Amino acid sequence: MNVLVCVAIAIALTASPSSASIGLSSTPEIVGTILDSNGKPAAGVPISVNPIPSGPSFITVSKKDGTFALAAIPPGAYGISVETQTACAFSDAIGVAIGYTTFVHLRLTDNMCNGISSW
């Protein structure tokens, strides 16, 4: 039996709730949604998935409905960062494992983040 421990997502610098969950997949992947500060889907937002402690990042852009996906991500721990000119969102560490999909839900905050991440 495969077991994956995943730390719940928490957005830095805000009290807005967010979450992560896990499903079965043939290859590791991260799937999620991003909302603006008003709770509406955020389209065209660049999303960076960063290996912890270091390594090359994986970049994607959210679709019109605020969804995003990255497939074939190597197993390991990652942090997700999103920065626009007027808003940001960061995740705590999430786990990615072979055979699982990690679902992530993020919400932007209306402030400048100045490149500060929570990991």
Image: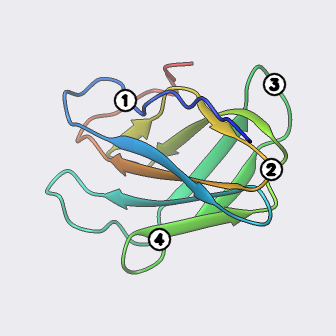
Of the numbered discs 1 and 3, the one sitting upstream in the chain is: 1
Q: Mark 3 points at which residue?
A: 54
Kind of residue indicated by mark 4 = Gly
Tag 2, which secondary structure?
loop
Of the numbered discs 4 and 2, the one sitting upstream in the chain is: 4
Answer with left or right where residue 18 lies relative to residue 33: left
Q: Residue at x 75, y 51 (%)?
A: 58
Dot 2 crowding, Cα within 10 Å, few <14, some 14–19, many 20+: some
Closer to the eye: label 4 or 3: 3
In this view, 45 is above or below 97: below
Query: Pointer 1 and pointer 2: residues touching (CB < 8 Å)?
Result: no
Q: Residue at x 68, y 35 (%)?
A: 3
Answer with left or right where residue 67 lies relative to residue 95: left
Of the numbered discs 3 and 2, the one sitting upstream in the chain is: 3
Q: Mark 1 points at which residue?
A: 10
Kind of residue indicated by mark 2 = Ile
Kind of residue indicated by mark 1 = Ala
Q: Distance between the residues labelled 3 and 2?
A: 20 Å
Q: Quick one: which residue is furthest to the left in this view? A: 38
Q: Which residue is drawn at 29% across and 23% down?
A: 13
